[in-house]
Amino acid sequence: MYKCMKYSYLFSALFLILSHSKAQVNLTNGLVALYPFSGNADDISGNGYNGNLRNGATFSADRFGNPNAALELDGINDFVEILHAGKLGSRAAFSFVLYFNSQSAAIQTLLGKRNQANSSNAQFQVFINWSQEPGVGYGHSYTNNTECSNVFTQYNVYLNTGIGSVNLNQWHCVVGTFDGTTQKIYLDGILKSAEATPLPHMD
């Protein structure tokens, strides 16, 4: 299950691409889900991984000023739930693109994939403002804590963009990639970190 949750911030688009392809870039090749958040949390990739708004999550203007074109979360308990299915499972390679605008300097999980059935782990996270991995980060961890906002413990494989890289009340674009051996993170079009890693599959 994917969740976008915790703290006050806006999303204008979320792309999930899980693919073994290493050919010329084609955003539709291997595209698993695409969420423009244009007044709903529907996946427009054609795969049907539509999200469900929870606890009053709503919409606001996007980075271009278009009304009802960005997801707005209240910082208390809002989130979007996307149930696990098919292509959201294990992949040897993947990438994601996420636009966000944060209004809080507190630690925040922007995107998470976790196993709720046995509360054993919070498998995959995109986060900001964690003191141990400052800026924007993403990776994989195992934990017994079921809350996405507090899962940065125990075993982990993370990359981050560094101190001072995220400004409040400003739109940013984060891109993460994993080709099966190397994990990379980009912020606003600039490669911030790359590392060979044993990043586990997102089962």
Image: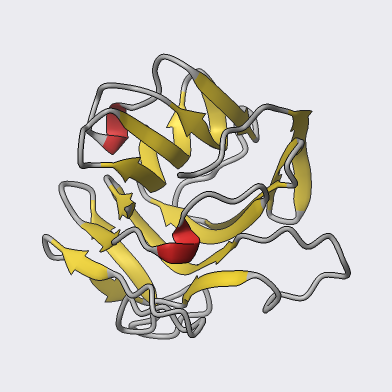
Out of 200 and 97, give the one closest to the viewer: 200
Q: Position of residue 158 (x, y in %)?
A: 58, 28
Q: Position of residue 21 (x, y in %)?
A: 78, 62
The reply, left or right, for residue 23 in relation to residue 158 is right
Q: Residue furthest top?
A: 154
Out of 43 and 11, give the one closest to the viewer: 43
Q: Is residue 1 above or below residue 62?
A: above
Q: Quadrant of residue 118?
A: top left
Q: Which residue corresponds to the image point at 49% horizontal and 64% vertical from the top-left? A: 87
Q: Position of residue 40 (x, y in %)?
A: 30, 81
Residue 57 visible to an observer of this rendering: no
* Screen quadrant of the C terminus: top left
Q: Is residue 149 above or below residue 83?
A: above
Out of 170 and 28, give the one closest to the viewer: 28
The reply, left or right, for residue 72 in relation to residue 133 is left
Number of marks in the rendered image: 0
Q: Quadrant of residue 153?
A: top left
